[in-house]
Amino acid sequence: MTVAGSGTAPSARAGTQSIKRAAALVRAIAARSRTGLRLSEVVQHSHLERSTARRILKCLVDEGFVMQEEQSRRYFLGPLVFELGLAAAPQFNLVDLCRPALRRIAERTGDTVFLVVRSGHDSVCIDRTEGSYPIKALTLEIGTRRPLGAGAGGIALLMELPDAAVDEIISANAVRLAAYNKLIVPALFTMLKRSRKLGYALNDTHITPGAVSVGLPICNRFGTPFAAITVGAVSSRMSAPRQREIAEILRGEIALLETALSEAAKP
């Protein structure tokens, strides 16, 4: 029997404290998602004992909220956070927010524009807008699901992730990639490296013969990519200078979108 005025039971307080500590660690890692945090830095930012922080981090890694890069031993947000982020924002509709940007891009380029989101190790097309050019590269239908790395959207979603996360995703998708014009892991890593150097995702080899796609990721306020916008066109319209031109159009629209999404996500 609980005595009146005795307050919350010790076990309940301990459970609540554990949740608060875990949430604090996730927030600290999210705030530095691009570079990650070492254990010593996690301890510094959370003000937890080293052993306590290590124990909570191990649990977060096991559950997918956090991941640890093998070489650097730095902690980054895990794959589960990406999936939860897609479902945890009922206050705005991503398609509705992005559609005006897709229309403007289609008008300026004349080509087909796609909006894809990350879902675990996959990308899913959730919207498409066609430009005025009569020959269209309709490489994706709304609802199409592909393994991350297959297509410009999948490459764009990998570009900003830490190498450890990329390795994990590509390893998990290795068998499925072959269905996309015999795409193999070494070729995907080459395409990813080239895209990072170019500053935009480029798919000019796989998926649809005669079509080329350019894309860029949409990131949340912590720098984590959760969606991407791509433009697809026939190869004859996708010279290197035009690829760069389209990438600049995408970059400008995505900057506006990221600001709007950040505002919409505020409580």
Image (spheres, rainbow, N blue to C red):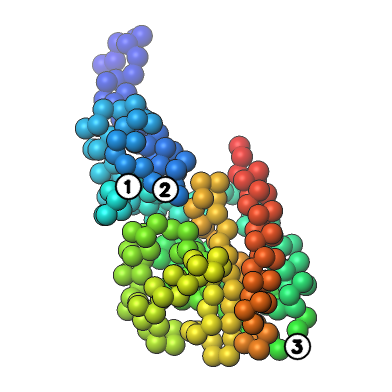
Disc 1 versus disc 3: nearer the observer: 1
Q: Could you tell me residue 28's position as x and y percent?
A: 42, 37
Between discs 2 and 3, the one toward the N terminus: 2
Q: Give the numbered dot on residue 35.
A: 2
Asked whether the residues under the numbered discs 1 and 2 touch, taking CB atoms below 8 Å apart as contact, a structural biologist would say yes
Residue drawn at x 71%, y 89% is 135
Residue 83 picture quarter: bottom left
* Earlier sequence position, callout 1 versus callout 3: 1
Residue 88 spot, x, y in % from top left: 52, 49
Disc 1 target residue: 74
The kind of residue on which mark 3 rests is Pro
The reply to whether discs 2 and 3 touch (Cβ–Cβ < 8 Å) is no
Residue found 32% across the figure and 11% down from its top: 6
Q: CA distance from mark 1 to mark 2?
A: 8 Å
Give coordinates of residue 102: x percent, y percent.
70, 67
The C terminus: image quadrant: top right
Quarter of the figure with the N terminus: top left
Q: Residue at x 36, y 42 (%)?
A: 37
Mark 1 and mark 3: Cα distance apart in space: 49 Å
Q: Quadrant of residue 139?
A: bottom right
Residue at figure coordinates x 62%, y 46% from the top left: 262
The residue tagged with tag 1: helix, strand or loop?
A: loop
Q: Is 42 above or below relative to 67?
A: above
Nearer-N-terminus badge (1/2): 2
Residue for badge 3:
134
Residue 20 placement, left or right of 208: left
Disc 2 crowd, CA 10 A, few/some/many (<14, 14-19, 20+): few
Q: Position of residue 12 (x, y in %)?
A: 31, 26
How many numbered marks does the figure carry? Answer: 3
